Amino acid sequence: MDLELNPEQRDVAAAFEQVLERESSAERVRAAEDAGYDPALWKVLSAMGAVGVAVPEAVGGSGKGVLELGLLAESLGRHLACAPLVEAATAAMLLADARGQDATLSEALAGGAPIVFCPRPAVDGSVILVPGGGGAQAVVALDADHLVLARGAPPKAQGDLGFLACADRPLRGAAIERTVVARGEHARRLWRIALGRWRLGTAATLVGVAEQALATAVRYAKAREQFGVPIGSFQAIQHLLAQIVMAVDGARLLVRETSWRHDTTAAEWRDAADIAFAHAAETAVRAAEACLHVHGGYGYTLEYDAQLYLRRAKALQLQGGDPEVIWEAIGAATMRRMH
């Protein structure tokens, strides 16, 4: 297994990083913070074909893989982008897999308001706190034994939830245009695959968040002086940041290996996606907390960026499920296979 990026993948990652540096600056993020959605940024990402990066060429996508989507997601995390790319790309892949949804898939790839995937099943005909739901024209979600696409006017994003444009979305009702994409076991299978892809893309985003939180902490540790020397010269700070470096590198390798398994159709990719998400989520929160620790009291003030990384990391962690619960499920599944 060779996880070294090839020249084309490096070029894709570099081009996307340049665009995010320009289009998702700290000022742009703060301007979009309340809504959690930057329409101008979304227009740029759509024009680049980012939504269809992992959709087959035969149905209008770029024909790349989840690995390439992960490279884009890492940049999204580093720049705290206010755009639901992972949710939209996951929805597009699901629509491609479902077949018979060509018109909707073309619409999803065309660059209008996003169509997003919800990583939680519906309860009483609604899905709660859908990431990107505050700016989406439609949501793809599992409603009992039906996989549905529900169109409706996007509501206002709810509260301060990591500026992810989270919003509740009804899947039924007079104001909702509801399309059944799949039924029964077929619907549940498609949703489980889509959830794994979403967790992989979100894990890559979390790697980017962790990487930038670490870089922010290092810059501050080099600049901030105490007792006449930079605080980065203190052994306690060095050990703390070194531990984060190792965790971030491990999370990135795990995400990329799992993405490679997905793209080469290895059967075990789905369980590995849960592991990658749980590890990346814990790592991102640890990195963001370390960033705040290095900044001291300043880290909690709105004027500094450190608090932005913690809010995004915690929100993404909660969207994908409590890592402790995921670890328990992984352990239980492993024990069943052993017996």
Image: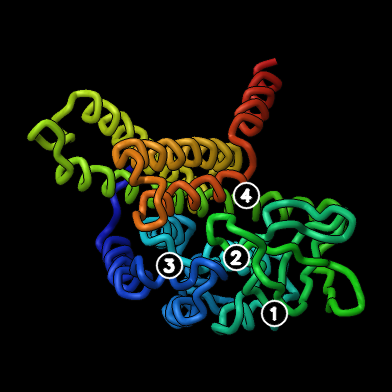
Q: Position of residue 20 (x, y in %)?
A: 35, 69
Q: Which residue is mark 2?
A: 165
Q: Which residue is mark 4?
A: 319
Which residue lies at the image location 65% right of the left edge and 17% below the top edge? 338
Q: Position of residue 35 (x, y in %)?
A: 57, 70
Q: Secondary structure at mark 3?
A: helix
Q: Give the mark, 4 or 3, whose residue is nearer the N terminus.
A: 3
Q: CA distance from mark 3 to mark 1?
A: 32 Å
Describe residue 1's horizontal placement relative to residue 38 as left or right. left
Q: Position of residue 183 (x, y in %)?
A: 86, 60
Q: Give the mark, 2 or 4, whose residue is nearer the N terminus.
A: 2
Which residue lies at the image location 36% right of the left edge and 34% below the top edge? 247
Q: Give the mark, 4 or 1, whose residue is nearer the N terminus.
A: 1
Q: CA distance from mark 2 to mark 3?
A: 13 Å
Describe residue 106's horizontal placement relative to residue 26 as left or right. right
Kindly give the residue lying farthest to the top in the view shown. 339
Q: Position of residue 274 (x, y in %)?
A: 58, 39
Q: Secondary structure at mark 4?
A: helix
Which residue lies at the image location 70% right of the left edge and 83% below the top edge? 103
Circle 4 or circle 1, nearest the eye: 4
Q: Which residue is mark 1?
A: 104
Please say whether residue 202 is visible from this viewpoint.
Answer: yes
Is the C-beta separation of discs 1 and 2 under 8 Å? no
Decide: few, some or many residues near mark 2? Use Cα within 10 Å; few <14, some 14-19, many ≥20: many
Which residue lies at the image location 17% right of the left edge and 34% below the top edge? 231
